[in-house]
Amino acid sequence: MNFLSQKRILLGVSGGIAAYKSAELVRQLRAAGAAVRVVMTPAATGFVAARTFQALSGERVWSDWSDDRSGMDHIELARWADRILIAPASADTLARLAHGRADDLLAAVCLASTVPLCVAPAMNQAMWGNAATRHNIALLRERNVQVWGPAAGAQACGESGPGRMLEPDALVRAVADSFSSERLAGVRVVVTAGPTREAIDPVRFISNRSSGKMGYAVAQAAREAGAQVALVSGPVELDAPDGVTRTMVESAQEMLEAVLAEVSTGCDLFIGAAAVADYRPASASARKIKKRADCTSLDLQPAPDILATVAALENRPFCVGFAAETEQLQRHAQKKRLGKGVEMIAANRVGKGLGFETDQNELLLVWEGGSQLLAMDAKTRLARRLIECVADLYRHRTKHQDFAQDHAENSA
Ligand code: CTP
C-alpha cells in the first residue's frame, strides 16, 4: 500500500552498528511510496557505505560538508523534507541535537528545518542510562522531538537492556502515524479536484490547465486529519490518495451530480478545489464539426456553479472555495466569498508560472473577519496547513452553532 505516497522523508543515519538496519528502512519507506533522501554522519560511513543508501534511495547521499555542493544543500534539504527521521540516533548525535550544534551536515539540516524531527536512538544500555543522555533526551522531548524507542534486549556489545533501535517496520508505521492527526476525526468531507471538460463535439472539448494536484493534496490532508473523504475528480493523471473514495467525472454537470449525490448521503465540509468551467457549449454536436473556409463561432452558456449550488442547499455543509486571481487577491477573494455565500475562500495568484501545473503554491485564506497568508510551499504541505486552518474555523463555527442552538432551546 502506498500509505506514504507524496511524503518526503529525510533519513539521518548516525554512527552505530544498527546502521545496517537503516538500509532495510530505506527500502521499506520507498515501498510505502515515500521519497527518501539520506544524510549520514561521517561516523556512519564507517558502518555502511554511502553507495548502499544511494542505490536504495535512488538519490545521491550527503555525508560531510564537501557533499554540500551548492553551499546551500543543507538548507535545500531542510526545505525539501516533510519529516526528518534519524535512525539510528547515536548518543553523540542526540547530544549535538540537544545543544543545537551545526558542525556536521546532519545537525545543520536539523537546525535549519521546521518540520517534525523524529529520532530512533540506538546505543549501549549504559550509554542510554547515563544522566547526560537522559538529560539530552528530556531536552529534545521538551522541544517536541519525537523519540521512538529504544527497545530492550540483547545488544551487539554482549550486554542486555534498553538501547536497541526499533525494527524498520515499526519505524515505517511510526512515520505513517506521525502524519495523522485527529483534527477532522469523524468529519465527512467532499472535495472536488481537477479540470472539467465541456464537449464541443465527440472529439473536442473546452478545458483548462488544472493538474488536480492541489485538490488531491487537500483530499489527502483531510484524510490524514482523520476525515472520511470523498473526492470528485475531473480528468487527471493522478492516483487516488489512500483511504479516499473517488468518483471520476468529465463535465461540470457530471461533477455537480456526483457532488450532490455525495452531499445527500452526508457531508459536513465541502471543499471546491476543482477548476470547473464557467461556460460550456450551448449544445454539443453529435457529429464531428467539419472545417469551413470562413470563420465560425461557438455559442456558450454558463456551466452550473457547483460551489454556489452546494452553499445554497438547505442543511448545507461548511463550504470552502478556491479562487484563482491575477491581482488584488484580498479584495477579489472577499468578494467571491460573499458572492458564493461560503465560509472561506483560498485564493492563489495565477499566471507567470504560478498556480496551475506547478508543485508549489501560495494561498491567501479569507473568512468573515479574518485572513491568513500561507507562504509559498509544496502543494502537499500547503494543503496540510490549509486543512489545519479549515479545521480550526470549522470547529469554532460548529461549537458556536451548538452553543446558539442550546441557548435558543433553553430560552424557549
Ligand atoms: N466553482 C464551481 N463551479 C463553477 C465554477 C467555480 O464550483 N462552475 C468553484 C471552484 O471549484 C472554486 C471557486 O468556485 O472553488 C472558484 O470560483 P470562480 O468564480 O470560478 O473563480 P475563478 O475561477 O477565480 O473565476 P473568476 O475570477 O473568473 O470569477
Image: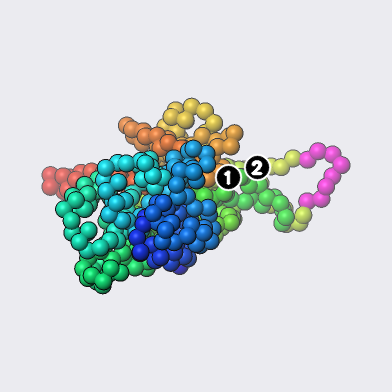
Label 2 sits on what residue type? Leu
Q: Nearer the viewer, mark 2 or mark 1?
A: 1
Q: Report whether 352 appears left or right of 338.
A: right
For residue 192, above or below residue 176: above
Majority secondary structure in the magenta region:
loop
Q: Nearer the viewer, residue 278 or 94?
A: 94
Helix, strand or loop status at disc 2: strand
**Mark on residue 357?**
1
Choose the circle earlier in sequence order: 2 or 1. 2
Residue lying furthest right: 293
Q: Residue at x 58, y 37 (%)?
A: 353
Q: Residue at x 26, y 71 (%)?
A: 158
Q: Is residue 339 visible?
A: no
Q: Is residue 98 visible?
A: yes
Q: Report whether 251 appears left or right of 137.
A: right
Q: Which residues are magenta?
A: 289-296
Cβ of mark 1 under 8 A from ligand 1? no
Q: Report whether 88 appears left or right of 231.
A: left
Q: Residue at x 83, y 47 (%)?
A: 291
Residue 77 quadrant: top left
Label 2 belongs to which residue? 300
| 165 is within the stretch colored magenta | no
Q: Percent position (x, y) of residue 203?
A: 72, 55
Q: Percent position (x, y) of residue 106?
A: 39, 47
Label 1 sits on what residue type? Glu
